Image: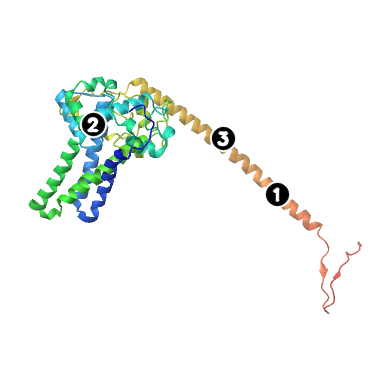
Amino acid sequence: MREEPDRVDWMRCLPFLVLHLGCLGVIWVGASWFAVGAALALYAIRMFAVTGVFHRYFSHKTYSTSRFGQFLLALFGGTTVQRGPLWWAYHHRHHHRHSDKETDAHSPHVHGFWWSHIGWITSRRNFPTDYSQIPDLAKYPELVFLNRFDVVVPAIFAASLWALGSLLHHVAPGLHTTSGQMLVWGFFISTTALFHGTASINSLAHLLGRRRYDTSDDSRNSFILALITLGEGWHNNHHRYQSSTRNGFYWWEIDLTYYGLRVLSWTGLIWGLKPVPASVLAEGERAEHAASLAAARRAAQSTSDHSALKRVVPAAAALAVATVNAAHAISPPRADADPAGNKPTISAPADPA
């Protein structure tokens, strides 16, 4: 299956169609402040599951946990409805090995924006998990189970939201929340937004933003994407050094996922968060310094060009005025009209005295 050409498998599109069409349920169930708030909260919480669990743990092992803790993290990640933890980790590691090359499954430079955003997931060749490429994870049967039956956790999660809405409708009627609202807002709308937020890193983080590090791909840093994805927008940083727990390498680069993992480490569930090496930070500072010097040189050149323009414009204006005056000096004599209405006569120039 991995050798097949890239093409859309319409059967693979059905889950995405159901997910997006489910958002239209808001027409029938309406909205409440509680349901909308739940959708926003579940977006943020589950984005943390994508970035802090699927990405920074299963894909890159940037911190440690126990086997039981690993299982709990995998269950948490399953609520994101982004398939299993091993599938996610396998494809992400493959992306790093072949980033922006022909074999990169979701490079916008190779395959275009829409394929890198959503199309690649609908291709049969990207459906399987190559367990031989993730032996450190494939040795745990509980993780393989969650990966093979990746619809179990999302189904339980959706059913739980429905049940919660029904419970609130009876015990807290003042919230004006129903089971349908919790399902539509908490599951369908929140999950759809979560998918597109995650996919924006594949489709946009190699197109928009600045490049601090000279990596072999076109990864970029974007503050906007970092806000949307809780820190994943510092993508050029990440492609320079993948083993760090934090993607925002410097204090001013907001990385909410890293802050959350720091807090989680205080509980003892995870430990051994890996820092950014001093050499990588120094390399970034040198790159920023070189970029600042280059910008200063461009600004100086622009100022120099502007100064030259200021000298040219007055000279051009004086030349234009002189040309107009010269044309006026050699203009033909004026025709004087006869008061009697006769044809105008040409006044001859007066003889010099």
Mark 2 or 3, which is nearer the eye? 2
What amino acid is labelled 3 in the image? Gln
State left or right for residue 48 relative to residue 177.
Answer: right
Between the C-alphas of marks 2 and 3, the distance is: 54 Å
> What label does residue 318 carry, if any?
1
Residue 344 at x, y percent in the picture: 84, 72
Looking at the image, residue 208 lies above or below residue 345: above
For mark 3, give the secondary structure.
helix
Residue 16 at x, y percent in the picture: 29, 42
Between the C-alphas of marks 1 and 2, the distance is: 75 Å
Residue 143 at x, y percent in the picture: 19, 26
What amino acid is labelled 2 in the image? Gly
Name the quadrant containing residue 330: bottom right
Quadrant for the N terminus, please: top left
Residue linked to disc 3:
301
First-in-chain label (1 vs 2): 2
